[in-house]
Image: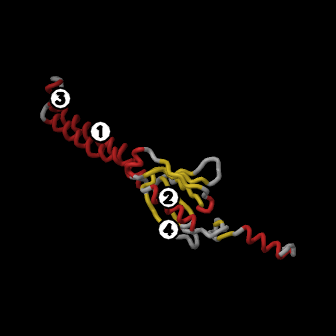
Amino acid sequence: MRKALLPGEQVIVVTRPQPRMLIVPALTFVVVPALAAYASAWVVKGGPAKLIPLITKDWNVWLVAVCVALAAWVVLGYCLPRVMTWHATRYTLTNQRLVARYGMLRRRDQQVSLAAVRNVVIEQSLLQRVLRSGNISLDTGYPSSTVVPDVPEAATFRNFILDAIDDLPQGGVFGADGMIHNPGEAWQRETREGGRDER
């Protein structure tokens, strides 16, 4: 992120979404291999042959392979993508903007200039209130506000945003080049040069 900073821009905080989204994948990562190991042991002890006499010990290798393959499929197909999604999501707050980046292979960036933010709202479910996380909505005056989902320590993060907004130069707007543009100051300069300044 430091390579992408604008001139004069400083990082205030970098965080990821609240890790509660990893609770189910973590439990799955523990339970599914344990069940696969139990099923494999049951197969080796001759459990399937007791249920279905047609199944002989020659089937054991294939049945154990099916148990291992199912466990690997769940871990690689369900747990790993969710961990990677969480790890690839990052929220960076600087003294000029809020940047939310999603994805590793398919990257999506969302940037909001703090100078354009009019209102900061926290929305929390009951679980989010317990975990002190929340969805932060940034009202920039457009019909749809920008929502940063599941921010950890949402109240503290909101306070960081408000402090950064308060520290912005009064009347100045950051342009794409990171310089501060003051439309009122430019207008006064033009009027003075044109001789229309009535002061």
Amino acid marked by disc 3: Pro
Numbered disc in front, either 2 or 4: 2
Residue 88 in sight from this viewpoint? no
Numbered disc in front, either 2 or 1: 2
Work out how far the residue at label 2 is from the one at label 4, CA to CA, in angstroms: 15 Å
Q: Residue pushed farthest top?
A: 53
Numbered disc in front, either 4 or 3: 4
Numbered disc in front, either 4 or 1: 4
Q: What residue is disc 4 on?
A: 11
Q: Are dots 4 and 3 in contact, CB under 8 Å?
A: no
**Residue 158, numbered circle:** 2
Q: What residue is disc 3 on?
A: 48
> Residue 54 or 129: which is nearer the viewer?
129
- Callout 1 secondary element: helix
> Residue 61 or 99: which is nearer the viewer?
99
Q: What residue is disc 1 on?
A: 70
Work out how far the residue at label 2 is from the one at label 1, CA to CA, in angstroms: 43 Å
- Residue 101's place in the image compared with 67, above or below, is below
- Callout 4 secondary element: strand
Q: Are dots 3 and 2 in contact, CB under 8 Å?
A: no
- Residue 91's place in the image compared with 78, above or below, is below
Work out how far the residue at label 4 is from the one at label 1, CA to CA, in angstroms: 44 Å
